[in-house]
């Protein structure tokens, strides 16, 4: 019996897995600064990530200091990475790990192995589909996530229905409304489980007034109705338990993000139980030396430009490792950061002595309650080490940013730190 031949091995200096904003920005910064190759792989047919099929404006503000549509933003980041000297391989899927820095991939050229001195995971996040939300009922056509909807409308130029219900009130939910409108589909209702829609008022107020989209708060979808094609959804008021049926031929499940963490799990990386992504320190190192993570894999989900700035930050940390100037020792250690109370998670989740501040000098947190004037309290070893009142609200459905300065008096050799908001 003949043994399976070992596939050819590529040996770049840096392997970036994921060609979205974080991965492309990291590659563009790394490529001119390392001696060897910076290789980006992505399973999709084109580089650019989610912005490729988000055909509306609002991208690039924080990282590029300009505003552009999603597709133009994706093309810009791809072109910049290529111009910097990075190599991008699309239709290339990582299937397994051979060792800590070697992955096995399948591509149009066949099976390959890629072994790098450093690996950056930038695989992003996805919305939970209807099955993951355990919503009972029929299984008709017309049920989508925002990503599926935008792919059909903007990339495949396909058709959806004429009357939709959008589940969720986040920023991405209004993106779904705009996509539906472009496809000639009216949004009959937006459904949010919270007392107020999660998105910023600058989107919710015009959405209701200009787009004519009513928002049902403190409500949830309890049943999908329709044989063959969707005919309606059952809505329940969470306070009164009253139920009603809304006629529609399209429903879009938005938000409720989960990181694309399959590769992180397969690598045996420590995962954060809150974010479900890799547990990283402020240099974005994972628990495996030489493996880093960036973007919405770490904090599902933030805007594309924030993910891109993660890519810039992680590139600088990779450069330190390749140059032998990384200040922190490999292996476990560091002070663990925990979210408490209404806060679901905090990222990054580790603080090591001598490490840099996190990207943009901000800690990122997720809350399940609306707090108009949040007061942040930081505790360690039974004492309060910082209190800070923020001039912006904490709200579900959007990332809460806390200045890194609240960690100034934390003992880098002490016990775990908890961060709460009241």
Image (cartoon, rainbow, N blue to C red):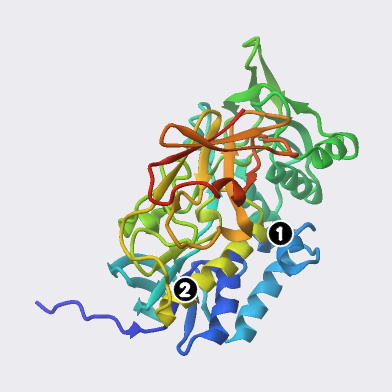
Task: Please indicate whether residue 370 sits to the left or right of residue 204 in the image.
Answer: left
Query: In the drawing, what numbered circle is on residue 318?
Result: 2
x, y percentage for residue 191?
A: 69, 29
Which secondary structure, mark 1? helix
Q: Residue furthest left?
A: 1
Q: Earlier in the sequence, mark 1 or mark 2?
A: 1
The answer to whether residue 184 is left or right of residue 89 is right
Nearest the viewer among 377 and 188 is 377
Q: Nearer the viewer, residue 51 or 152?
A: 51
Q: Position of residue 166 (x, y in %)?
A: 69, 36
Marks 1 and 2, how far apart at CA: 35 Å
Relative height, residue 248 to residue 15 (above, below)? above
Question: Is residue 81 positioned above or below 243 on the image?
Answer: below
Q: Nearer the viewer, residue 317 or 156?
A: 317
Q: Is residue 344 left or right of residue 49?
A: left
Q: Nearer the viewer, residue 16 or 64?
A: 64
Q: Residues within 10 Å of mark 2 (few under 14, many from 20)?
A: many
Instruction: Residue at 76% x, 40% y: name it.
Output: 200
As helix, strand or loop, the secondary structure at mark 2 comes to helix
Residue drawn at the location 48% of the way across and 44% of the way down? 275
Name the residue at the bottom extreme. 35
Residue 5 in sight in this render = yes
Q: Which residue is mark 1?
A: 154
């Amino acid at each position: 019996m003949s043994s399976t031949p070992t596939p050819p091995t590529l040996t770049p200096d840096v392997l970036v897995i994921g060609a979205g904003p974080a991965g492309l920005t990291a590659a563009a910064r790394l490529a001119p600064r390392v001696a060897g190759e910076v290789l980006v792989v992505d399973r999709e047919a084109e580089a650019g990530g989610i912005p490729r099929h988000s055909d509306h404006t609002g991208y690039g503000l924080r990282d590029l200091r300009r505003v552009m549509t999603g597709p133009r933003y994706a093309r810009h980041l791809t072109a910049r990475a290529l111009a910097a000297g990075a190599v991008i391989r699309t239709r290339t899927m990582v299937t397994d790990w051979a060792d800590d820095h070697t992955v096995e991939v399948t591509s149009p050229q066949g099976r390959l192995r890629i072994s790098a001195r450093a690996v950056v995971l930038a695989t992003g996040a996805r919305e939970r589909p209807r099955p993951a939300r355990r919503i009972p009922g029929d299984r008709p056509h017309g049920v989508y996530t925002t990503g599926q909807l935008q792919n059909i409308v903007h990339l495949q130029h396909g058709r959806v229905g004429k009357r939709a219900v959008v589940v969720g009130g986040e920023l991405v939910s209004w993106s779904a409304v705009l996509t539906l409108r472009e496809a000639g589909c009216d949004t009959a209702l937006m459904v949010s489980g919270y007392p107020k829609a999660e998105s910023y008022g600058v989107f919710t107020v015009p959405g209701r007034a200009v787009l004519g989209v009513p928002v049902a708060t403190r409500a949830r979808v309890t049943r999908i109705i329709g044989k063959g094609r969707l005919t309606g959804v059952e809505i329940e008021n969470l306070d009164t338990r009253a139920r009603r049926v809304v006629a529609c031929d399209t429903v879009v499940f938005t938000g409720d993000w989960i990181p694309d963490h399959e590769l992180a799990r397969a690598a045996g990386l420590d995962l954060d139980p809150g974010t479900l992504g890799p547990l990283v320190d402020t240099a974005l190192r994972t628990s495996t030396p030489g493996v880093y993570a960036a973007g919405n894999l770490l904090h599902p989900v933030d805007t594309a430009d924030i993910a891109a700035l993660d890519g810039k930050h992680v590139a600088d940390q990779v450069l330190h490792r390749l140059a032998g100037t990384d200040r922190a020792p490999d292996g476990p250690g560091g002070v663990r950061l925990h979210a408490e109370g209404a806060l679901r998670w905090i990222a990054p989740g580790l603080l090591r002595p001598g490490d840099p501040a996190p990207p943009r000098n901000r800690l990122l947190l997720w809350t399940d309650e609306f707090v108009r004037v949040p007061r942040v309290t930081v505790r360690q070893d039974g004492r309060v080490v910082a209190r800070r009142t923020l001039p912006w609200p904490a709200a579900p459905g959007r990332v809460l940013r806390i200045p890194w300065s609240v960690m100034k008096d934390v003992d880098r050799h002490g016990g775990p730190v908890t961060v709460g908001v009241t």
